[in-house]
Amino acid sequence: MVTTPGTPRLLRAMNDRAALDLLVAQGPLSRTTLGNLTGLSKPTASQLLARLEAAGLVRASGTSAGRPGPNAQLYEINGDTAYVAGLDVTPARIRSAVADLTGKVVGSYELPTPGRSAKGTVERVIKAIDGAAGEAGLNRGRLHRVSIGTPGGFDPTTGRLRYATHLPGWHAPHLLDELAAAIAVPLEVDNDVNFAAIAEQRVGHAKDSDNFVLLWGEEGIGAAIVINGQLHRGATGGAGEVAFLPLPGTPLVRNVSRNNAGGFQELAGGEPVLRLAREHGLKARTAQAAIAAALQAEGAGDAVLNEFAHRLAVGLAAIVAVVDPELIVLAGGVITAGGERLRGLVQDELAELAVPRPRLLMTAIHEDPVLAGALQSALTTTRDEVFDTAGPPIP
């Protein structure tokens, strides 16, 4: 039956969803508090909670304390209603986690994959998922959705991975179909930096920003672009592959897909940053360690940080001129190693190179933002599906 606007059934469904979203965002709430937040009367709020409890979507979770008068019963989302898995894939390892419907991580697993061959990709993914699910005391069949973040991006016109030649085993023409068949639950695969931006958008600094850019600095340079609240992926999934930006200060790179390099990468990627530090006498094994060491070294360290900030600002100036974001979030281990000092240097330099003046903030997601974003993406879709369909028919 088609529901028409204004019917009691539709209004109850809207109230139920509003209450569920509040319970997700604010944790356990009493009937009175929920009624105040939704504008519902106490009897209506009681009926709403009874419906949601009967549907298995909420459960009682103790009572309030510390206030005058009798303690009030608290209600929370029933996390056992659904589970999701997220994966963060790099050439060196696959990190996985399982979260319940509230977003609480209940299991995690890490599978080292150094020097792996192109074969066995599906089996490794299954092992990572099963490892996290097993730690949570679940089997894979209990998962509602799986989200996987990888370098590069899958071209929606071909289904093949692009911009990530350093990730062996992920370029097979039918890989996504093989993964979906093996996992046997709904699957989402996206660029790793896009997932980091989703984490920032859901639980980080970008919660109130509809237009922002997340700049990612690890061994490679990348970006995620959010326009009007939506990730911009581009026609081939390549939006944000800013490593290939031709920039002043480096020779023009041709055949970039074959060389897997470009101007911004040659300025501010991991290897150039490590060379920069060594040129100034700072010894480190990784670019991240080099930037951390620069913070502690006067003179040479100042020179390294100033030059690194300049290089980041040159790339950001090109991005800002096209996108004009209200916010730039700096993320990734190499960039965040420079902390607030590096952020301030980039902010000052960018002000000299670009007309727009977006805010610059260091990421609020410090523990594997790619994995956090994969879980958040899976949870958003799962909550929509579960909250809108799991309840019994409303009389």
Image (spheres, rainbow, N blue to C red):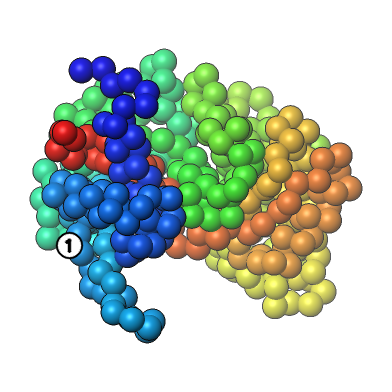
Query: Looking at numbered disc 1 in the image, what kind of residue is underneath it?
Result: Glu
Measured as percent of width and height from the top left, residue 250 is found at 76, 39
Q: Is residue 92 visible?
A: no
Q: Is residue 143 left or right of residue 147?
A: left
Q: Is 125 on the left or on the right of 304, as rendered?
A: left
Dividing the picture into quarters, in which one does residue 252 lie? Answer: top right
Residue 35, position as x, y percentages in the image: 37, 55
Q: Secondary structure at mark 1?
A: helix
Task: Give the residue at x 55% y 30%.
Answer: 232
Mark yes or no: residue 344 visible: yes
Badge 1: residue crowd in 10 Å (few <14, some 14–19, many ≥20): some
Q: Nearer the viewer, residue 271 or 16?
A: 16
Q: Residue at x 61, y 23 (%)?
A: 255
- Vertical order, 323 against 369 (above or below): above
In the image, 84 versus 65, the foreground residue is 65
Residue bearing mark 1? 135
Who's the residue at 28% across and 67% down the image? 74
Q: Position of residue 29 (x, y in %)?
A: 34, 63
Total marks in image: 1
